């Protein structure tokens, strides 16, 4: 696999590094892991400096539609830092454009160090409220004196 990621729940951060040819299947696996790991609202650091792709425009569009669906269903999205070399910017511009629609801090960098410093300085999206186990209409337990 040419896309490797880590999810750090305690930091509310997901980091991904691309190296070599990233396929549609690689990106689908990444998005599956993000959803299954509860990381949609986490900050994300994506380093694509060493990555490449031969995905078709249809593949890129399908991924964009999937990402847009996540953006529409999640109320809070964490900040996103993307590292892309200038010579690959045109290749991923459609996906970057879809990502930019979301209401969250996002920046594109050519330097990994600058991107890391920026994402580390961004506040994490708030944690979802804890469930109390009470359903609607169920009263609180009476407090003891």
Image (spheres, helix red, strand yellow):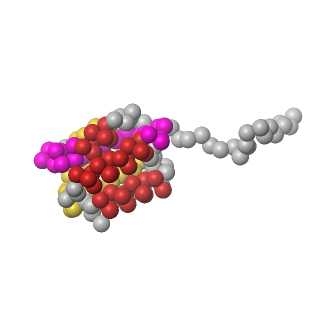
Give coordinates of residue 77: x percent, y percent.
43, 39
Give coordinates of residue 46: x percent, y percent.
30, 49
Q: Quadrant of the N terminus?
A: bottom left
Relative vertical location of residue 1 with respect to residue 31 in this rendering, above or below: below
As drawn, the residue found furthest toward the left would be 87
Instruction: Identify the residue at image location x=83%, y=36%.
Output: 143
Residue 117 falls left or right of residue 32: left
Instruction: Identify the residue at image location x=23%, y=57%.
Output: 55
Give coordinates of residue 124: x percent, y percent.
44, 39
Q: Is residue 21 visible?
A: yes
Instruction: Identify the residue at image location x=29%, y=59%.
Output: 24
Residue 60 falls left or right of residue 67: left
Instruction: Identify the residue at image location x=69%, y=43%.
Output: 132
Q: Quadrant of the C terminus?
A: top right
Q: Is residue 117 visible?
A: no
Give coordinates of residue 140: x percent, y percent.
79, 38
* First to last magenta residue range: 72-93
């Amino acid at each position: 696999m040419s896309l490797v990621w880590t999810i750090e729940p305690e930091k509310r951060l997901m980091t991904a590094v691309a190296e070599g040819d990233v396929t549609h299947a690689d990106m689908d696996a990444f998005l599956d892991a993000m959803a299954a790991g509860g990381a949609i609202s986490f900050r994300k650091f994506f380093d694509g400096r060493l990555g490449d792709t031969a995905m078709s425009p249809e593949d890129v569009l399908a991924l964009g539609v999937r990402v847009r669906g996540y953006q529409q269903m999640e109320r809070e999205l964490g900040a996103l830092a993307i590292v892309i070399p200038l010579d690959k910017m045109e290749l991923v511009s459609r996906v970057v454009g879809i990502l930019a629609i979301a209401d969250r801090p996002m920046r594109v960098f050519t330097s990994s160090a600058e991107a890391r410093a920026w994402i580390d300085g961004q506040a994490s999206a708030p944690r979802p409220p804890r469930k109390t186990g009470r359903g609607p209409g169920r009263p609180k337990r009476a407090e003891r004196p």
